[in-house]
Image: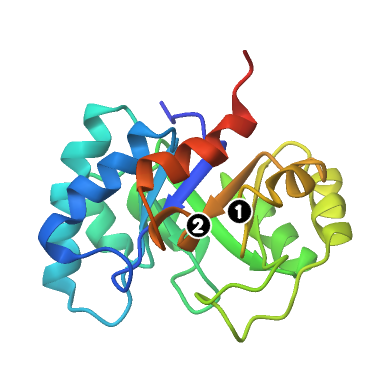
Amino acid sequence: MKQTINGLYIITDKKLIPRENFTEIVEQAIRGGAGIVQLREKQINIKEIHELGTNLLKITKKYDVPLIINDYVDIACEIGADGVHLGENDPDIKFARRKLGENKIIGVSCYNDLERGQYAVENGADYIVFGTPYYTPTKPEREPTSLETLIEAKKKFADTTVFAIGGISENNAKEILETGVDGIAAITSIFGNGSPEENAKKLSVFFNKD
């Protein structure tokens, strides 16, 4: 059975997380309230991604938090991750579903493209991500995504989980969530400076129902 996906979604970045204490740093963010973790590691070899994913999965299982592997469907299958995240140059959603099975999570980056969102939903994506609403050093070349696009995305795909990503921090999270999206994805605001646990707390508080 698939786990529920919403709230604070954290994404790893090798430029921000030292390898020597990688899992410990991610665990700190989970303790702070992260509800889903994506292993996103560019420009490193497959063996290292496999190893990082295997180690990280031990932590995410401990907290019952889904682990999503960016790009690599085969690695997600091999290590038993909870799902994959696909970008525009990654394997097709239907291929990923055949490989992973019906009980795994598939997420898709839609950038600021509602048509891509439609394609993703029609082909079985469990969640879709739109961004970037604000400048982010992770994707400096990305075209901005308006708040109106986020509003339209949630209206159009009301039955699918929608995340926003890109430059989101405690200072603008409320504005983003007022668009109706189900969650926010964060990299720099979690791992860029300070304590990942405290940073996660500052964002996860927006999802606390108490």
Left or right relative to 78: residue 85: right
Which mark is first along the chain, 1 or 2? Answer: 1
Q: Residue at x 50, y 75 (%)?
A: 138
Q: Which amino acid does label 2 sit on?
A: Ser
- For label 2, the SS is helix
Image side of residue 176 versus residue 137, left or right: right
Labelled disc at residue 149? none
Query: Residue under circle 1?
Result: 169
Give the residue pinned by disc 2.
Answer: 189
Q: Where is residue 157 in the image (x, y as percent from the top left)?
A: 77, 46
Instruction: Tell me: 53 left or right of 125.
Output: left
Tell which of 74 and 18 is nearer to you: 18
Res 136 → quadrant = bottom right
The outermost residue toward the bottom is: 141
Tell me, yes or no, whether the two marked residues, 2 and 1, touch with CB atoms within 8 Å: yes
* Residue 118 seen by the camera: yes
Where's the N terminus, which quadrant? top left
How many residues crowd mark 2 within 10 Å: few (<14), some (14–19), many (20+)?
Answer: many
**Percent of width and height locating residue 202:** 54, 39
Q: In which quarter of the image is residue 65?
A: top left
x, y (%) of residue 177?
74, 42
Front residue (pair 209, 91): 209
Q: Distance between the residues labelled 2 and 1?
A: 6 Å
